[in-house]
Each structure stands twice: as C-alpha cells, then as structure tokens.
Image (cartoon, grey):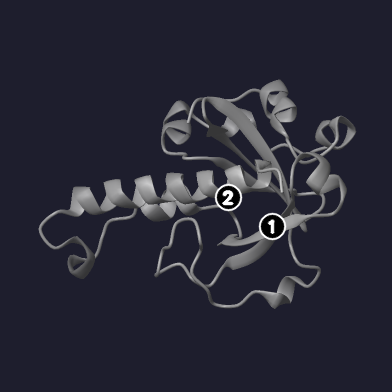
Amino acid sequence: MNPLTESQIRSSFVNCSRREAAQVTLPDLPALTPEAWDRLDYLGWVDRKAPLRAYVVLTVDDALVGIALRAPDDPGSRRRAVCAWCEDVTATDDVSLYVARRAGAAGRKGDTIGTLVCTRFECSRNVRRRPTLIEAGQDPAGVVRRRIEGLRERSLRFAREVLREV
C-alpha cells in the first residue's frame, strides 16, 4: 500500500458524511515507516477514542475507499472464529463482527453489511507469517503469495459490496 496522508484518508470515506469523516480519529501515520506501508494490504484501525468504531481504507479500482465500521455493543461478544479476510486458522482468538453502512442511498436508508475481521486489523501480518510445514509443503513462498492474494480479493469484495447499489 502507498503511504497515505490525512486528507487522502478523510476524503476516501464512502459511507459517512463529510462531518463524520472530519471527526475520525486517525491512526499515528508518522509512526508508519515506508517498510510498514509496503507490508500493508489495507490500512485498518480501531478508534482509540471510541473503541466500538473502526475504519479501513483500501484501493478499489485505483481509487481509495474508506469504510467506517461499527463493532457490536458488547466487547465480550467476541468468539473464536476465522477472519473472513485473512482466513488465518492460527489467529482465531481476536476476531470481531464489524458492520458497515452501505454507501449512498442504501446506507442512508439503514442498509448494512457485516463481516468477521481480525479485531485489530492484523490481517496483513497474519498472511505474511511463516507457513507451517504442513501448510507449506514444497512451496512456502507460494503459500504466502496465495494468502496475500486471497486477503486482497476478499477485502476488495467487501468494499465493493459496501459500494454496491442495492
């Protein structure tokens, strides 16, 4: 992922108002090194001021798409599950249901879509972890490459679903 600026992030949100986008608590962007950006397939973070709010920004057809998400009201409602984006079978303890309003008129009517995602949006790290011998077989680099491609495809599918007119 290319490094993003505050204005790029704020202007990318598709499922909230401009006022809401202006009030988003951003992650610590200066702390992200060029190497960190290179290892991100999307930028995702939990709002440190409102922990039930989260955000993701990813590229869809060469355009930045920011999505505001909500977590369930009960933080204790997390269960062991597999993240729908990274599908990591080893990191199943910290997966949450996140819900996003759809973009446009559908979202203004209250239509939403949900997904199970790593609570702290660590999917990019999870897909890059060293494969176990059973997973890797003769091609460990191929396993990691396929994981990264799968993460990108599944997160992109979710973003397109948020954008889709119902």
Residue 84: percent from left, percent from top:
51, 61
- Compare marks 2 and 1 and give the one earlier in the sequence: 1
User: What secondary structure is marked by label 1?
Assistant: strand
Where does label 1 land, which residue?
113
At a point 70% along the width and 76% down the height, the residue shown is 77
Q: Secondary structure at mark 2?
A: helix
At a point 63% along the width and 34% down the height, the residue shown is 65
Q: Amino acid at mark 1?
A: Ile
Residue type indicated by callout 2 = Phe
Q: Is residue 103 left or right of residue 126?
A: right
Q: Position of residue 144 (x, y in %)?
A: 28, 50
- Residue 74 coordinates in the image, percent (x, y): 78, 73
Q: Is residue 138 above or below residue 145?
A: below
Above or below, 81 relative to 100: below
Q: Which mark is residue 158?
A: 2
In the current view of this chain or complex, which residue is farthest to the front? 166
Tell me: 21 left or right of 42: right
Relative to 74, 58 lies left or right: left
Residue 128 in view, yes or no: no
Alpha carbon separation for disc pair 2 and 1: 9 Å
Q: Is residue 148 above or below residue 80?
A: above
Q: Residues within 10 Å of mark 2 (few under 14, many from 20)?
A: some
Residue 140 in picture, x, y percent from top left: 19, 54
Question: Marks 2 and 1: CB-CB under 8 Å?
Answer: yes
Q: Quadrant of residue 116?
A: bottom right
> How packed is label 1: few (under 14 Cα within 10 Å), some, or many (20 or more)?
some
